[in-house]
Amino acid sequence: MGETEDERTSQAGQLFENFVQATTCKGTLQAFSILCRQLELNLSDHRDFYSSLKAAVTYWKAKGLWGKLDKRASHKEYNKGKACVDTKCLIIGGGPCGFRTAIELALLGAKVVVIEKRDTFSRNNVLHLWPYTIHDLRNLGAKKFYGKFCAGSIDHISIRQLQLMLLKIALIVGVEVHVSVEFIKLLEPPEGQGTDGPGWRAEVRPADHPISGYDFDVIIGADGRRSTLDGFKRKEFRGKLAIAITANFVNRNTTAEAKVEEISGVAFIFNQKFFLELREETGIDLENIVYYKDNTHYFVMTAKKQSLLDKGVIINDYIETERLLASDNVNQEALLSYAREAADFATNYQLPSLDYAINHYSQPDVAMFDFTCMYASENAALVREKNGRQMLVALVGDSLLEPFWPMGTGCARGFLAAFDTAWMIKGWAQGKEPLDLLSERESIYRLLPQTTAENISKNFEQYTIDPATRYPNLNSTCVRPHQVRHLYINGEQSLSFQERSGPTRTSVNISTRESEVRPGRLLQWCQKQTQGYRGVDVSDLTTSWRSGLALCALIHRQRPDLIDFDSLNEADCAKNNQLAFDVAEREFGIQPVTTGKEMNAEQGPDKLIMVLYLSKFHEMFRNSPQSITGVPKDTGANNEDYSSKTTNSLYNSINQALPRKRIPKVDKMLEDYDNKKRKKARSHLEELMPNQSAPPVGEKEEQKENKVRSMATQLLARFEENAPSCGVRKQSESETDKPVTLDMTENPRFAKPKSQPAPLPPPPPKPKRQPSTYLRLLESHTRNETHHSDHRLQILSSHGHKEIQSNHKNTGIHHSPQLTEIPSSYQSSESRPRSPHIPFKVLQLDSLTADPSDSVPSFTPALSAMFQCQQKLEEEVSQVNGVMHQSNSLHF
C-alpha cells in the first residue's frame, strides 16, 4: 500500500511539474485538465478546489508555492474565502489584468469565469514593472513558474510570459478559463420570471457554448481599449503626432548577447549626442528608444514622421493619421530595415545577429502604430437593474485607463485597478448600497491616473485589496452618492443612457467636442481666463500650474466671491492648490485628481492629470459670459477720468448696491486712490464719501455711522444730479459737451446687453437762488434739531413699503424722498450694468423749496448736527440696513 501511495505521489508531482513547465496557453490548459482528471479533482467545486489540489500534490517543489498562496489567502479581507460566497463573476479578456482580477475574486470565494477569444499568448512585447508589481508577483509564486523572473536588477517581463504565469495561478485557485470564446453582449433577465427565472447572462460566440447558460452578478471588462461593454463614456487625450515602432529579435542566449547592456529608456533631451549621431550616421531620427532583453531582444522607439518619409517607410504624407499609417501606405521591407538599423546602432553593433522573431501571424514581429491619442473611461463601474435583478459592471486594465508606454504604467496601474475592483465586489457581495458602492469606487478611481512608483505606499508587504493600504492620500468619500445616480441604470434609464454614451468600441471613431479634449485648445482657453492676474503666466499644462495661483485665478475669473486672490501667497504652493481644489469640489462639483502637496512636487504635476482636471472647468465654463467676453483690459486708476467729483459720487453710490468682479492688477491702485480721496475730504466738502471697507472688529458705533453716511451720500448724489445749477446737469443736457464717462459696460468682465436708454426727466424749474444742495441739507438738520416730531419717509422696495411721518415745523422745507430706480441714461453712462438679482434704487427728491434768505451755517456745527440726526435716522430706516450691509461688504 505504501508503494502505491508513493507512486501516486510521484505521478501527481510529475503531472504538476508538466503543468508548471507548459509554455503555451493550450499546453497549459491541457496539462491542467490531465492533472485534475488523474487526481480526480472536481473543477466545478471552486470553493474547495485549491485545498483539494494542495492535499493531492505534496511534491516538494509545490510546497513552496502552497506556502506563498496560503500567506496571500490569509489576508483578513478575504475572510477565509467566504467574503464573496455565492457571487458569480464573468471576466472578459485573458490579459494580465483580467487574470490578476480573477485571482483576487477567487481568493474572496467568488465563482469566477474568464473568457478569451484567442487561444494563444503570442505577444512578445515587454512590460516595465514597478517595484510593488514585482513584489506582488513574487508573493504569488512567480519564481516557481518562471525562474528568471526579475533576477538581479531586471524589472520587466514579456506579456506572453506574464499571461502564462497568471493563467496557471488562476487555475490553481479555482478560476474557470475558456479560450476561443468571444463576448457579444449582455442579455437582460426575461420579464415575469421573478427571482426563480434566468438572471443576467452573456451572449457569446459560439452561441452553444456552456457559458451562455450561466447567470452572473458581476461582469468585468478587461478586453483592452476597444472594450465591448456598453454604457461607458470615454475621454480622448490627443497630443502631437507620435509614431511608435516595436521590434522583437530572436534571443539565442549566447554569451555575446548576454554582455549587451539594456537601455531602460533614453530620450533625446537627456542624450542629445546619441540621437544626433544616429541621425547623422543612419538618417534615422528618433525621440526616444528602449531596449529590454527577455525571451526576445525587444526594442521600442518613437520615430519622427519626416525621417520615416525620407527612409521610404511611409510612402505618402497624409494629414489623417489613419491614412498615414495604413498598411497600404507603409513599405514593410523599409520598416524592417529601419528598425534593425536603429537597434544595431543603439546596441553599438554588439548583437551578433538581428533576426526577427515570428509573431502569431507567421510574420516578422515588427509593428508601427500611432499613440497620439490615449483614452480613459469617465467612470470605473456602473450598476444595471432589470426586472428586479441587479448586475454590477466594471472595467479594469486598458479598458479603464490606457497607459502611456514610455512611463511603463500599464501593468502597475492595471493591477491597482484590479485590487480596487475586487474591493468593490466585496462590498457588493456584503449588500452595500449601490450608490454608496459606486461613489466609493469613483473616488478611488480619481487617484489612479496620478499614481507613480514614487507616490504610492512603500510598505509593499502590507498591500491588500483595501485601497487604504496602497494609497497614502486616500479620500474614499470625495464623490458623493448623488453624483453617481446616472451610473445606476434601471430599465427606464437604460435606453437613453446607451444612446447617449454608446458602446465603447464605436466611440473610438467619434470626435465630438464633448468627448475630445485637445490640449492646445484647452491651453489657449486657460491663458485667456487667467491673463492679467498677478503672478500667473500659463505657458503649458504642467509647471505653470505648480504655484496654485493659476487655478485660483481660473476660479476667481468665474466666481470672484469664492477666493480672495489678493491675499494669496505665491510661495505657499500647496496651500494655494488645496484651496482651489476644495473650492472647485464644494462649489462646482469638480473632483480633485491630486493634492496640493503633490502639485508642489519639484517636477510639477503630470500633464495627463492636468488635462483631465482642467477639461472639467472648460466644459463647465466655456459658454459662461465671463469666458465669452474675453480678457479684461489691464487698466489702472490713473487712466480713468475723475475730473467730475459729483459724477464720481454718483458712480460710487451706484456701485455700492451692485455685485462686481475685480480686475486683479488694478485693485491696489484703486485702493490707493480711495485713500487719497478720504484725505481730501477735510478740505473738499463735496468729496465726503463713506468708507468702502469694513470697519475693524469692535468699532460698532463707527460702523453705524458709516451705514447712515452711505445712505446720506446716495441722497446727496441724487440731489446734485437733479440740481439745475449743477455743472454735471448742464453738461448732461448739452449734446456736444458731454463728460467723460466711466462706462464699465465697456469692460468685457462686466459686459451685458445694453438696454435702450430712457429719455431724461424734465429738469425742475430754476429758483431765484440755489445754494449748495449739501449745505441746504445740513442747514435743514441744524435748524430743526429741536423741532423733530413725526417724520414721514415713504420707502418703496421690492418687498413692500413702510410709511413714516416727517413734518418739519418752522421751516419752508418739505421733502418726501422715495426709493426709485435710476434712469437708464445714468446707468449707461455712469454705472455698471444692474444686477438681475438686486434692483438698484436711490433716494429721489420729489419737491424742494428753500428760503432764499437762509444763511449758510458754519461747517463744524453743521457736521456735528448732521451726525446727531443720522443716529435718529438710522432707527427709522432699519429696513434699508440689509441692503446697506451688503453694499459695505462689497469693495470697489
Image: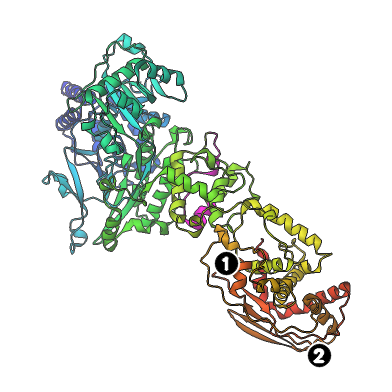
Kindly tell me whether residue 613 is visible in this rendering.
Answer: no
Q: Residue 302 falls in which quadrant of the image?
A: top left
Was residue 824 drawn as part of the magenta stretch in this picture?
A: no
Task: Report x, y in % for residue 279.
Answer: 38, 19
Amino acid on which the number 1 mark rests in the picture: Pro
Q: Residue 719 falls in which quadrant of the image?
A: bottom right
Q: Secondary structure at mark 1?
A: loop
The boundaries of the magenta stretch are 582-602
Does 22 sit above or below residue 482? above
Q: Residue 689 falls in which quadrant of the image?
A: bottom right
Residue at image point 44% right, 38% down: 451
Task: Quickly name the residue at label 1.
Answer: 833
Q: State how far apart marks 1 and 2 are (Cα).
A: 41 Å
Q: Secondary structure at mark 2?
A: loop
Task: Quickly name the residue at label 2.
Answer: 809
Residue at image point 27% right, 42% down: 226
- Whichever of labels 1 and 2 marks the residue nearer the N terminus, that label is 2
The quadrant in which the N terminus is found is top left
Amino acid on which the number 2 mark rests in the picture: Lys
Nearer to us of marks 1 and 2 is 1
Was residue 589 drawn as part of the magenta stretch in this picture?
A: yes
Q: Is residue 509 left or right of residue 649?
A: left
| Near-viewer residue (241 or 740) | 740
